[in-house]
Image (spheres, rainbow, N blue to C red):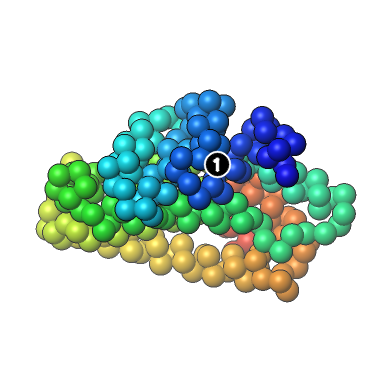
């Protein structure tokens, strides 16, 4: 209904872009027109082409996405509206992350799955891992959902590096692939522990609504990573 009533609203276009199930959806093209520097519609297309097994189109869209300077899902605007809703109604949604955001991260994960399962996508394992690292770096540089994006980026890189020899050099960093995998594994373990606290304190139906509101306000002002550090301290 919202699509028919407000077809040119940027948030409706962005939401429709994420939630579409077709890589040929006109909403993806519309999103490119509204925000041509945003890699979002190309990553969504790549994910959907990958699910169809069309890896030629997957690669085409993925390459365009990596070449673009930004990736945004308009989180801050939606957070502001959620806080306004809380203040107006005194009610807090069960989840800080909406179905939209969950779908978005699922799509990102499926893009990474293609790289992990097709190590010769870019000619050889090393070239494909370099492309995966570029994606991981883009995700780790995100300002929206900075913690969740960092976790997604680390997970993609860790999985793809499994295709390389442990003694191979990790770029020009002076460390081995094996050492980098160990470093990523340690980071992922710490992040997973934080996610457990996150789930209990924020996503649980029995979570304190005041705590949810404080967390969301802090997340909007300072970022997810900062809000999560605050939450972990509050949980002690």
Question: What is the tally of numbered marks visible in this picture?
Answer: 1
- Residue 114 drawn at (x, y percent): 31, 53
Q: Secondary structure at mark 1?
A: helix
Query: Dividing the image into 4 quarters, which one contains the N terminus?
Result: top right
134 versus 178 height, above or below:
above
148 versus 72 height, above or below:
below
Left or right of 17: which side holds 62?
Answer: left
- Residue 86 drawn at (x, y percent): 81, 53
236 versus 67 height, above or below:
below
- Residue 107 drawn at (x, y percent): 46, 52
From the image, tell me which residue sits under label 1: 17
* Residue drawn at point x = 36 percent, y = 38 percent: 61
Front residue of this view, candidates 74 and 222: 74
Left or right of 117: which side holds 107?
Answer: right
Front residue of this view, candidates 55 and 178: 55
Query: Dividing the image into 4 quarters, which one contains the C terminus?
Result: bottom right
Q: Is residue 151 visible?
A: yes
- Residue 196 drawn at (x, y percent): 54, 70
* Residue drawn at point x = 42 percent, y = 29 percent: 69
Dot 1 alpha-carbon crowd within 10 angstroms: few under 14, some 14 to 19, many 20 or more: many
Left or right of 137: which side holds 120?
Answer: left
Q: Is residue 40 visible?
A: no
Q: Quadrant of residue 151?
A: bottom left
Query: Residue most toward the bottom?
Result: 206
Left or right of 151: which side holds 162?
Answer: left
């Amino acid at each position: 209904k919202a699509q028919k009533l407000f077809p040119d609203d940027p948030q409706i276009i962005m939401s429709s872009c994420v939630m579409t199930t077709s890589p040929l959806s006109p909403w993806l093209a519309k999103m490119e027109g509204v925000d041509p520097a945003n890699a979002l519609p190309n990553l969504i297309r790549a994910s959907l082409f990958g699910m169809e097994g069309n890896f030629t189109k997957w690669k085409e869209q993925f390459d365009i996405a990596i070449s673009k300077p930004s990736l945004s899902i308009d989180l801050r605007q939606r957070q502001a509206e959620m806080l306004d809703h809380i203040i107006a109604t005194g009610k807090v949604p069960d989840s800080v992350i909406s179905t939209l955001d969950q779908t978005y991260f699922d799509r990102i994960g499926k893009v990474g799955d293609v790289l992990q399962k097709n190590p010769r996508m870019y000619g050889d394992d090393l070239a494909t891992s370099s492309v995966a690292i570029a994606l991981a770096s883009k995700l780790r540089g995100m300002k929206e959902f900075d913690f969740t994006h960092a976790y997604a980026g680390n997970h993609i890189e860790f999985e793809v590096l499994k295709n390389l020899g442990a003694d191979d050099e990790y770029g020009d960093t002076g460390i081995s692939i094996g050492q980098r995998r160990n470093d990523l594994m340690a980071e992922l373990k710490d992040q997973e522990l934080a996610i457990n606290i996150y789930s209990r304190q924020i996503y649980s139906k029995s979570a304190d609504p005041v705590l949810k509101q404080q967390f969301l306000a802090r997340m909007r002002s300072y970022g997810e990573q900062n809000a999560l550090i605050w939450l972990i301290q509050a949980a002690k």
